[in-house]
Image (tube, grey):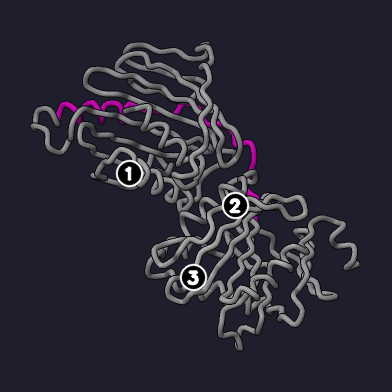
Amino acid sequence: MIKLYLQVLICVLVCYSSPSLLPEVYAQEPPPPKTIKGTESLYESEEGGFRVAFPSKPTVRSEVQDTSFGKTSIRSYVMTSLFAAYVVTQFDFPTVMDDKYDLNARFDLARETQARSLKARVMSDAEFYFGEHYGRSLVLEAADKTLSTRMFVVGPRLFTLTVGTVGKLSTQSSKLRLANQTRIDRFFNSFAVTSIPTAISTAVELPADFQTSVADGHFYSQFFGLKIQVPDKWVVLETEQAEMILEVGKDALKSTKPGLVEHLSDKNTRVIGAFGKNSVENSTDGTFFIMMAERLPYPNLVPSALAASALKFTVDQKDQLIESPTNVQFDGIDFYWLEKQDKKTKLFQRMYLANVKGIGFEISLTYKNRADLEIMLKALASMKFGKAALQTQQ
């Protein structure tokens, strides 16, 4: 029970990807417990930076896992008894994790994936604060077990506390339910953070100006060192026109995904540039080549994780998935792309995602006619990065 739960929980929270893209887990012998001390009533881990009241000394496990920011070591502290299983899991992100939308997206995905994997019912899901640190409190009830979990981040470190009890907590006798709830509360309330690690990096902020220009039939961005050919006779959109396309998309999401709309602020998402088959005012088919920049939670986020997130959060019931995330390179830079089609409007959208200079770099191709896609793909193939790409502009 606990092993399956931990594997699902960790993969979702760290990898920020679809369950179908869970990474391989590499087992590793735990480090010698030289810096760990414990008693039957209170256990303290100097390495983990916490103390908590396990009923008896837990087993320490360590795994190295491929994640959205490379390989990382994940430690879990597990103690099982006849009546319950107690678990503390912790790992460190590269940066301080304080973006509530990003955390909620991870927590939501963890809840959905856990419930599906365990065939469990979500009995409660509420915001939780460990002091000033944001998290979520979750209770899942399966046919023969109940899992009570608290997930929260302190600086760059994510803690998950779980108590697994036998049977359905909600249908137990009042005496048994009280005994189990007492076990859960005693464990949760005894937890304390004793040290906070220092983040090894910081998120890269979007610049005030991407330094874009158009010359000799090419679009340039000095900031990204980008050069890309504009299709012949296509229109390069003014900044205000390109931003209007984004605003229209955000407006359409207000009723269904208000949190996402709030997250898509200038701080987090901006249009770099765009060109279309026709001008915005004259377009009737929505054929556009749009370049966007996204602030990432950490600068070393891998493009496959960007694509997995796009698959999860941008492809919904109104869409048909045409192509799952697939790797491709442009000028030596790894991109992942996927494609969907709106079932109602028949409009296709193909997205290419990469990490350039610690910033999410996205290209969106929207079209209805295959011939227009071929024109945009030719422009995409001309894309160059680096100082050499800008030399012809001098």
Q: Residue at x 54, y 70 (%)?
A: 348
Q: Which of marks 2 and 3 is in front?
A: 2
Q: Is residue 36 magenta?
A: no
The answer to which quarter of the image holds residue 59 is top left
Q: Distance between the residues labelled 3 and 1?
A: 30 Å
Q: Residue 116 carries which label?
A: 1
Q: Nearer the viewer, mark 3 or mark 1?
A: 1
Q: Which residue does the numbered mark 2 point to in the structure image?
A: 326
Highlighted magenta segment, given as a residue range? 178-205
Q: Is residue 391 above or below residue 199?
A: below
Q: Which residue lies furthest to the bottom in this view?
A: 282
Q: What element carries label 2?
A: strand
- Provide residue 367's location: percent of width, then percent of height: 58, 74
Q: Which residue does the numbered mark 3 point to in the structure image?
A: 250
Q: Nearer the viewer, mark 1 or mark 2?
A: 2
The three-letter amino acid code for the residue at tag 3 is: Lys
Q: How far apart are marks 1 and 2 (CA)?
A: 26 Å
Q: Residue at x 79, y 57 (%)?
A: 385
Q: In this view, does 225 lie above or below 76?
A: below
The three-letter amino acid code for the residue at tag 1 is: Arg
- Provide residue 104's location: percent of width, then percent of height: 42, 50
